[in-house]
Image: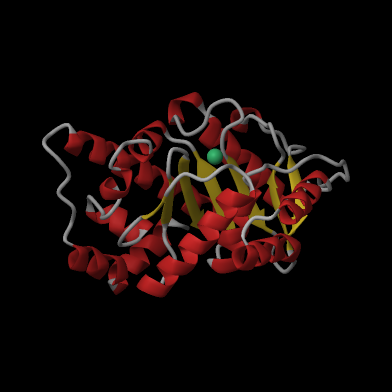
Amino acid sequence: MSNLVTQLTQLAKITGAPEADLTIVAEGNIAVLEPGTNRFLVKASGVVMGNATEDDWVYLNLDRCAQILIDADKKGVTDKLDKAFDAILKESVTPNGKVRKASIETMVHVVAFHLMGATWSLHTHPTPVVALAASKDAAKHYSGTVFPDEAVVCGPVPLFLPYASPGLSLGLGVYQGVEKYQDKYGRSPGQIILGNHGLCTFGSVSSEALSTTQIAVKAAKIRVGALSSGGINFIPKKAAQAIAFRPDEILRRKMLSE
Ligand SMILES: [Zn+2]
């Protein structure tokens, strides 16, 4: 079994551990781009992260998936595109050649690989993040960063996206949200908050995606604490940007991912 499959399974066990409070039952998923190829591995549909085995990952073709997002970006989510996406999910195969349906949230990872240059993509449903993402003023609570490491590790401003139905609509929302963010900030978001849903983080190695998730969860707990203590006082935007782009902080972020 490939090294990537072993790493995926290890990361799934860590994120699916009950004490981590990142996913329960079949929630969440992980994907990794296979270096030097045009395919990626993603969790098969219905697999419980904490119980994942090396047989629970399936291969998908990145270009085929990305083309569906590009078409949806032009025409919107049509029945034809929905069916094409469903067909791709159903045709996916495990490294052992067994056909298994891929996760319906696959497109979130496709955006990470196609637009953001990430090779690891982790999607979870941490309780404090979902609590904020399901709150009345969710966008406001995520309009800035709350402590320096959040800006360093997750980027100067989180990308908050309103609720979208799981599947192609969710993928399209993330695709368009990331494009807008990149135009505005000249970099990719480090954390994406999906309204009423969860968290997406990324990396060039599995530990980077995990440490970014851990910082994002801590940042969510701090927001909840600040809201119960009279309201959130964000780091001033310019200061957050300065930290996020400072050379020594970029080096620190790099060291965190090693
Ligand atoms: Zn999800």
Residue with the most extreme left position: 230
Q: Quadrant of residue 188?
A: bottom left
Residue 44 against residue 159 in the figure, above or below: above
Is 223 on the left-hand or right-hand side of 217?
left
Is 84 on the left-hand or right-hand side of 245?
right
Residue 100: percent from the left, percent from the top? 81, 39
Residue at left offset 18%, top offset 56%: 235
Residue at left offset 19%, top offset 68%: 238
Residue 97: percent from the left, percent from the top? 88, 45
Residue at left offset 38%, top offset 36%: 134
Residue at left offset 64%, top offset 62%: 72
Asked if one can make out residue 204 in the rendered structure from this viewpoint, the answer is no
Is 78 on the left-hand or right-hand side of 156?
right
Residue 109 against residue 21 in the figure, above or below: below
Asked if one can make out residue 100 in the rendered structure from this viewpoint, the answer is yes
Residue 91: percent from the left, percent from the top? 84, 48
How has the structure been colored for display? secondary structure
Q: In this orientation, which residue lies closer to the viewer: 79 or 175? A: 79
